[in-house]
Image (cartoon, rainbow, N blue to C red):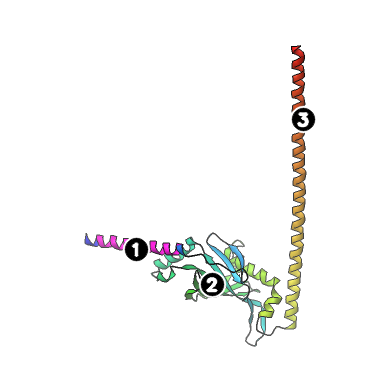
Amino acid sequence: MNSMKRFIAAALIGCASIAAFSFARAEAAAPAVPETVYEWVQSSPRMNYFFNKEQIKFAVRGDGSVDINTLVVPVLKTYDPVKIDDVVEKRRWRLEPVDHLSDLAGEADYVTISVASHTVTVSRVELLDSHFSTLERLEPDEKIDLLTLSPQNLDSRFYNGIIAWSGRHGVEIGERTRGTLTHDDKKHLEETEKKLLKADKKAAEEREEAMKREAKEKAKHDKAAKDDKSDKGAKVEHEKNGRTRIVVGEDE
């Protein structure tokens, strides 16, 4: 009987600690992500995905030369309350400490992306509070092969989004990277960027033309519907007036 009482007491204390943790987390303000520093890529029901566009750069080889086929980029993921609870509960099951995570708001990952092979290496993960201060540092050394993932996969969309952005800002990234950029590589970056931006402009113009055609067709359809309604209204009124005259005639 005493053991049962102790079990119930322990369970109540555990529930109270979980409730206290959830309340503290709910009270924490959501972190504000500066748009001038972070580029938003996508949002899922549980996280928002960004990368640091001020710190993204190319890798530098041992001889000091720039490797334009490898990106080094810090990424940021902010959590929603359900994701925070999920992270905390998984740590509880692994009997890992969670008290320091009462203000958990997201994570900062430090990744290397091989553009040529479409592989991603996550070398470090820092759990962040609502002020972007580090709560805990992890070193998962996780490797992701983008070619094996579905196009709808969140990691695939996120990292391929970064690759696409880098292609349109290659010159800027090259200038930011502290290393020796060869003339041929610089020319390649310039040509790739110009080609992609030109394609973007053409696609935008085609979308605009399609929207104009759609608006024109809609206006045409609306006018036809309005004219048809007006014609039907005039016909009904004519028939009504006709019946009125007939009735008057009969009365006379």
Q: Position of residue 136 (x, y in %)?
A: 46, 74
Tell me the element at label 1. helix
Residue range highlighted in magenta: 5-26
- Give amino acid for label 3: Ala
- According to the image, label 3 marks what residue? 234
- Return the disc, 2 or 1, that comes first in the chain's sequence: 1
Residue 108 marker: 2
Mark 2 or mark 3: name the one nearer the start of the chain.
2
Q: Taking 106 as reference, is 192 left or right?
A: right
Q: Is residue 131 above or below residue 60?
A: above
Q: Whole-percent x and y of residue 76?
A: 56, 70
| Amino acid beneath label 1 | Gly
Query: With respect to residue 252, does 191 lie above or below?
Result: below
Location of residue 181 (image quadrant): bottom right
Amino acid type of the residue that numbered disc 2 sits on in the rendered structure? Ala
Q: CA distance from mark 2 to mark 1?
A: 30 Å
- Residue 16 drawn in magenta: yes
The residue under the point 39% across, 61% down is 19
User: Residue furthest toward the top?
Assistant: 252
The numbered dot on residue 34 is: none
Q: Is residue 20 magenta?
A: yes
Q: Main secondary structure of the magenta part?
A: helix
The residue lying toward the viewer, choosing from 86 and 12, is 12
Q: Quadrant of the C terminus?
A: top right
Q: Residue at x 74, y 20 (%)?
A: 244
Disc on res. 14:
1
Dot in front, 2 or 3: 3
Say which residue appears at 40% left-offset and 67% top-offset: 92
Quarter occupied by residue 179: bottom right
Q: Position of residue 190 (x, y in %)?
A: 75, 75
Q: Is residue 22 left or right of residue 45?
A: left
Q: Residue 62: percent from the left, percent from the top?
A: 62, 86
